[in-house]
Image (tube, rainbow, N blue to C red):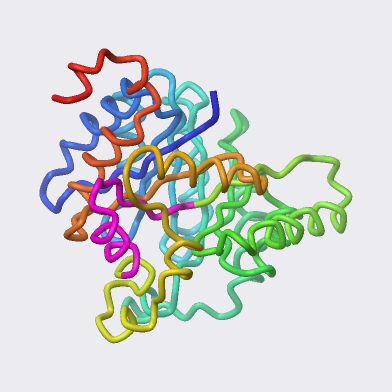
């Protein structure tokens, strides 16, 4: 069965919902859940998800390398990997200046910072070992670094038509490092599952523009199609297949609702994209 993961993003003050969300995703047939860090601690959320599930992989998308020293991060992720029974994937990223700047973080040179962070992380990792490491990449530089030093790459906001080119950068990094190891290809994919195609497309435009009203006007239909999965279940599944055909191995759906609410988006995606939905009687799917 093709892999398909779903991001978990509970509303503020509802962290207890994480375990239920992860459990339901597993029951629905998703192969993994992923936790962001914009407003949460990705490692704590991952621990909650791991203790509530038995089979699916748990990943972070992403864990910000500027937030934790490698000496602190290494044992923490090793413990999560152990608690999960080897199901944890550490997704590392540098985030953005708009996120890090207000927190007083000087990002310096992100690619050099990431390279050094991964090296130090391995240095401080306990003897018991740690999880696979995926690097978040928006551009070719970080994609190449993923091929050099990581177990996987986690793309975001890479257009469908440019995806083969992005993967080629990863393979270039592999050749440069002479690793002889396959770097797995994952990507966050924004999605809105709804029978209202026009409104779902509008939700995609808002997502692509980061909800900035002025920027939304500049997002045209082809751009939404390149970056976002939207519409009824069958259309969304078809678009996922298109992404997989380019070399994507692990799609991680980042859901939104028609109103932009990520928690409602989770419910919509859980019902609309559930791999087990086709195995359920029609009367159950209508509930």
Q: Quadrant of residue 145?
A: bottom right
In this view, the residue in front, 160 or 152, is 160
Task: Determine whether 142 is above or below 278 in the image.
Answer: below
Find the residue positioned furthest to the left. 13
* Residue 220 percent coordinates (x, y): 41, 75
Residue drawn where x is 26% and y is 59% of the image: 39
* Residue 114 percent coordinates (x, y): 61, 64
- Verify whether residue 28 appears in magenta: no
In this view, the residue in front, 80 or 226, is 226
Find the residue positioned furthest to the bottom. 214
* Residue 216 percent coordinates (x, y): 31, 78
Residue drawn where x is 66% and y is 42% of the image: 184
The mark tally for this picture is 0
Task: Determine whether 88 is above or below 221 in the image.
Answer: above
Q: Is residue 35 left or right of residue 166?
A: left
* Residue 227 percent coordinates (x, y): 47, 62
| Range shown magenta | 188-205
Task: Determine whether 103 is above or below 278 in the image.
Answer: below
In this view, the residue in front, 15 or 117, is 15
Locate the N terminus and report the quarter of the image it occupies.
top right
């Amino acid at each position: 069965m093709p892999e398909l993961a779903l991001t978990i993003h509970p509303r503020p003050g509802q962290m207890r919902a994480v375990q239920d969300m992860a459990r339901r995703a597993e029951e629905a047939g998703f192969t993994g859940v992923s936790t962001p860090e914009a407003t949460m601690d990705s490692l704590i959320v991952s621990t909650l998800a791991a203790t509530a599930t038995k089979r699916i992989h748990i990943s972070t998308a992403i864990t910000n390398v500027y937030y934790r020293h490698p000496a602190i991060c290494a044992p923490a992720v090793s413990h999560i990997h152990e608690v999960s029974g080897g199901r944890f994937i550490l997704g590392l990223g540098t985030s953005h200046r708009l996120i890090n700047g207000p927190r007083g973080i000087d990002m310096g040179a992100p690619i050099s910072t990431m390279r050094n962070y991964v090296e130090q992380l391995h240095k401080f990792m306990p003897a018991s070992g740690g999880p696979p490491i995926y690097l978040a990449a928006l551009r070719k530089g970080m994609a190449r670094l993923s091929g050099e030093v990581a177990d996987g790459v986690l793309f975001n906001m890479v257009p469908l038509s440019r995806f083969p080119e992005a993967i080629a950068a990863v393979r270039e990094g592999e050749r440069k490092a002479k690793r002889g190891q396959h770097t797995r290809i994952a990507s966050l994919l924004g999605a809105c599952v709804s029978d209202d195609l026009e409104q779902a497309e509008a939700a995609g435009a808002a997502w692509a523009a980061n909800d900035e009203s002025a920027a939304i006007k500049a997002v045209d239909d082809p751009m939404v199609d390149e970056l976002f999965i939207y519409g009824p279940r069958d259309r969304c599944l078809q678009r996922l297949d298109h992404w997989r055909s380019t070399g994507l191995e692990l799609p991680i759906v980042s859901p939104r609702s028609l109103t932009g609410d990520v928690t409602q988006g989770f419910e919509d995606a859980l019902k609309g994209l559930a791999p087990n939905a086709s195995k359920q009687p029609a009367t159950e799917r209508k509930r």
